[in-house]
Amino acid sequence: MDNFKRTLVTCALPYANGPVHIGHLAGVYVPADIYVRYLRMRGREVLFICGSDEHGVPITIKARQLGCSPQDIVDKYHAVIKKSFEDFGMSFDIYSRTSSKIHGETASAFFLKMYNDGKFIEKESEQYYDTEAKAFLADRYIVGTCPKCGFEGAYGDQCEKCGSTLSPDELINPHSAISGSKPVKRKTKHWYLPLDQYEPWLRKWILEDHKEWKSNVYGQCKSWLDNHLQPRAVTRDLEWGVPVPLKGAEGKVLYVWFDAPIGYISNTRELLPNDWEKWWKSPDTRLINFIGKDNIVFHCIVFPAMLKGYGDGYILPDNVPANEFLNLEGNKISTSRNWAVWLDEYLKDFPGKQDVLRYVLCANAPETQDNDFTWKNFQTRNNSELVAILGNFINRVAVLTGKYFEGKVPCNLKPEKIDSDTLAHIPQIRGEVENSLEHFRFRDALTAALSMARLGNKYLTDTEPWKCAKNDMDRTASILYTALQISADLSIVFAPFLPFTVVKLDKILNTAPLGWDRMDGTGILPAGHQLGEPELLFEKIEDDAIQMQMDKLASAKEANEKRAKEEIEKRPLAAKPECTFEEFQKMDIRIATVIKAEKVPDTDKLLKLTIDTGLDERVIVSGIAGSYPPEQMTGKQICILANLKPRVIRGIESNGMILMAQQPDGTMRIVEPDGNLMNGSQVG
């Protein structure tokens, strides 16, 4: 950090086809905001950039489903996401969007310079084309049956049922999501970034120069590089996006993975039109990209290759502190299955509790491996840590000061060694927090911060000012003087983590926001300083509030199970093992007419059918009474397997079997001949 004058922090651009959920927050936005707030408190020059990612196929698919334009979709969700972030306390310097005019200009110019500098290669390939819609189909626009699990709604790039990565060529019975027609392959031309040419440089830059990166980031990058990089298309056939700025490229846009990271640059330009270059082209600037696990390859390999290829002094990421995935109640978060905790809904259900969610997501952050969010843990951490440790200490100190000293900081009249020994821990805790935050270990930093509140509670327990006040007010004054200094230090150390809470704490202490360097254990609040009115920093979360959230998830699970059952019911039964033509020829299937039908006594499902096969009259016993009453069967033509070995059922010899069609839901229907056919006619 000492080699840089300023820090540029970016967050992965959230995709504007739905609200933000807790997985996004834990993986990217909460740690980034903590880090930025910490840097600002240290007096460092920092810029915090983010915005909505508004291009790509999923948005066009959603627009088609809802019968509106892609712009309508992104306008709706950009507003939802931006307001949620504002209400949650994200301290972005700018939150913009990739559908803005300045982004289109920036991305187009970026592509054009690289094109003119010969940084792309042109390749012609065959891609699926919808002849009815007259459009090339992105992988997400091709739907078919998954070859792995049989799910009929799999996309050309992934099956959301079993999670398998697919290609359109693997789908069974692929069809266009636009028209429903079967696509054909046609040739199309695109421009590619030859990542293979950057591989030697990337290997050195990452594997040798950035061994300090988090193990999960470093490991994933090494895996990609060891498997060798391939050219990657930077354009695609689509109408929604930044148009490719070349003649002859009509109907093509910049691929969203190329387009989106340029949004960091365009958003900076929008914020600082005359001063943006010092943040992107000065070696004095440190670039930090906060992202999630699924964006590691783009921000550690692709985006750096883009910046390297563009040249012109662009700096490269100094660190990319990516987190793993956060699960929900033991299952993977899924937006399509509504298995998520949405930020906008949380803010409505838990008004004023932004910091509780920030705290829990930081405490459970999936920093090096996937972690789990549960509502019970959320409740426990609030009640047992925020309320019982941090809130309890502050409230006891404020109330006791009001009771014994009219709410004024007392003089340190009778100090003892325990006071100085306790305050001596403050610089040590501060050092632990700083070291953890500087190295992107946010859980450790939060644990250290909470240890300061634990220190304060232990100090009160050991000194017992409520007992001391009975006969030694001078000693009581020193105890509360010391406890109030710890309270002020808590206001500082928790400011990056719990910004809303610290505003309340500063009001209780009657102080302006305090700088980080004031936290040194020597005392901040002078004797005689008037405190504000005591108030609770946190309140307990009751069981009924948690149950409401569990009921939401239960409803989502029930809806998913119902939908899955309906999909299964629509799906044909799996094919039986193949048979030879000779084996098939052994089956003698004939047309027959039912002469007489009657229920088999003492049964609910069995009918005794007397039939004319054209060759003879015979009896067949069939379990169809639940669907076909006897009077409905008389005179009906059916198909039978005539040479099936006879079998005795309920004392009746059944000589043959009726051909039935079993529906996916298990119901059986008779396969009826088309028109009145001669009895004995062979089927096959």
Image (tube, rainbow, N blue to C red):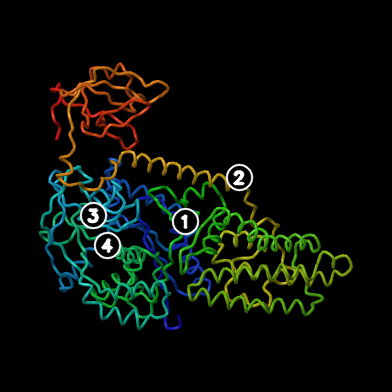
Residue 673: horizontal and vertical position, in percent?
18, 26
Residue where numbered disc 4 is placed: 259
Q: Which comes before the other along the chain, label 4 or label 2?
A: 4
Depth check, front residue: 529 or 215: 215
Residue at 53% over, 78% down: 435
Q: Amino acid at mark 1?
A: Ile
The image quadrant that residue 651 belongs to is top left
Determine whether the residue tagged by mark 1 lies in a helix, strand or loop.
helix
Q: Amino acid at mark 3?
A: Asp
- Label 2 vs label 3: CA separation? 44 Å
Camera-near label (1 vs 4) is 1
Q: Which comes before the other along the chain, label 1 or label 4?
A: 1
For residue 248, side relative to residue 513 (left or right):
left
Determine whether the residue tagged by mark 4 lies in a helix, strand or loop.
helix
Camera-near label (3 vs 1) is 3
Residue where numbered disc 3 is placed: 139
Residue 22: which disc? 1
